Amino acid sequence: MHSRAAASLLILLVVGAGVLAVTAFADLGSSRRKPIRNDGTFRITAVPSQGMSLDPALPSAALGSLIEATCARLMRYPDKPPPKGYTLMPEVAKRYPKSSNGGKTFSFELRHDFRFNNGEPVRADAFERQMIRLLELEDYGAYGATLIRNIVVGANRIQNGPVEAMRHIEGIRAHGYRLVIRLNRPVPDFPDRLASPWFCAVPPDLPADRQGASLRFAGSGPYYVAENVPGRRIVLERNKKYSGTRPHHVDRFVVDGNASDASDALDRVAQGRADWGWASPNRFFEPKRRLIERYGTNKSQFWLKEGLNFNHYSFNTARGLFQNNASLRRAVNFAINRRALRAAGGPLTGRLTDQYLPPQLQSFRDAHIYPLNRADVRTARKLAAGHTGSGRVSLYVPDILTLRAGAQVIKQELKSIRLTVEIKSFPFPVYVAHVLDTAEPWDLAWSSWGPDYLDPSTYLNSLLDGKSVSNWGHFDSSRYNRKLRRAALLQGEAREREYGRLDVELARDAAPLLALSYGNAPTLVSKNVDPRCIVLRPDLDLTAVCLK
């Protein structure tokens, strides 16, 4: 993800945030009268190279949904369709936390009835321990640490690297069922951060294992890890001590690392040899699969829902052609036919957009700034006149067929405003390093962004604040920095209104990004899965599944 530097871009490209619930029920006729089945084994196929890590501090792309089934958190988003599915709610916390000290202290009172599968109570120290583990494992992929390291008092003193002794964080006080967290500055969205997948309750003595693959630990959610053979087999069993409200219909999940690749995983599901298997979106859209022709959409086995990954191109505002050149950036936004650009990957790959916030957020206001289905060449030429400088654009994209095809579309479209595009593609593993290298002379670069948690700041502030490490284009406007930082201090409806206004203003006036689409999240399940229990978050919520 172009958040948190290079290593996680692939995960964001194909997974996204995975913290929200979008329920999609088919028109099932008489099947609605049948009771939901509450037993059975749900079979999952995986590729061993996908890691198969079940450590909530080090989630793998393939098994993030599986980890969700073992986790209870202080706050979460309900397994319901929008708009309720986008409303933060307490889980282990009794209620929304109390805020004091000018918004720099949050106090959580915990429920007394949550239990790990071994019968031990889930107390405040279970959450403190997980936060410490995140900080200790940050250099090994524990990206959740970035949400607290410079926020919680004393968190930056916990160094990377596992140690034997249990540690404590100065700003966290865990006393029985009460958790008090002190922050260095007001962060109104701090409770939302704790709804992220990383902040799972774990046993207070759980070590920080940098490998994570063979980890077995008591589960705080509806299921727990009963067996874990790295790269070969994982078994989750029902947590009989669970007293929360999350659904848990099947008895167990069995994951076999028997798929040769992602295509093989989908084949196994289609053939009924597995009930689900993780694969990147492009695998679903391979013409040979004919998934819509075979199953329809959102009816029984093939599901397609709008995701939260923001596909876009960043203008390099720190150098060259687009530096201090909002007029030309706007011209490019008018000159591009987004439908033609998306066509390089297929019409099912995403929902076109000309703005930066996802339409699912309450703050989103559809302002119709740029045309989505055509290019407005006349307006583009007016804006570009006198601002084209050298007339040469260096475009960087990963060496992926659909992205190279999209680059050719951009090259052709920008001829209309007398810009000559030179395309440079790099193998995916090194692409991000090239873009982040400030010595690289790129002008326009592809990216896909997914949020860590649901809040408009995770898009606008993360991508466009001048101090953000995720700001690839180095957009650094004192005016917009002030506005973004002020918006981040607001709460409730005032926060939603201000971010909605800022989204429109940034896209319309400053145009630091070329917005393209919000990627669709496809899911394929076997014919053995009951479609009444399909909950998409936007990936499949495994906790909610049931069998016929």
Image (spheres, helix red, strand yellow):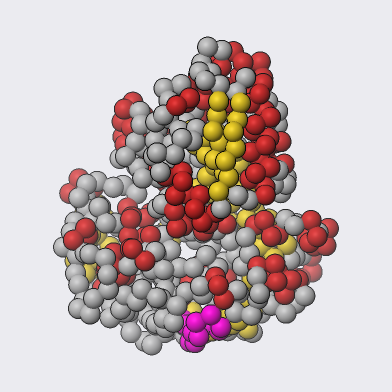
From the viewer's perspective, tell me whether residue 267 is left or right of residue 166: right
The residue sitting at the right extreme is 293
Residue 225 colored magenta? yes
Out of 198 and 12, give the one closest to the viewer. Answer: 12
Residue at x-position 20% and y-position 78% = 165
Tell me the residue at 51%/72% (across/down): 51
* Above or below, comparing residue 377 to residue 192 in the picture: above
Magenta-drawn stretch contains 305: no
Quarter where residue 62 is shown: bottom right
Q: Is residue 325 above or below residue 235?
A: above
What percent of the width, then of the height, locates residue 432?
47, 49
- 119 left or right, relative to 388: left
Q: What residue is drawn where x is 67% and y is 21%?
A: 416
Location of residue 427 in the rendering, given as x and y in whole percent from the top left corner: 56, 53
Question: Predominant secondary structure in magenta?
Answer: strand
Question: Residue 60, how many percent across, how many down?
Answer: 49, 68
Q: Quadrant of the C terminus?
A: bottom right
37 above or below 32? below
Q: Name the one closer to the observer, 156 or 70.
A: 156
Q: Which residues are magenta?
A: 224-234
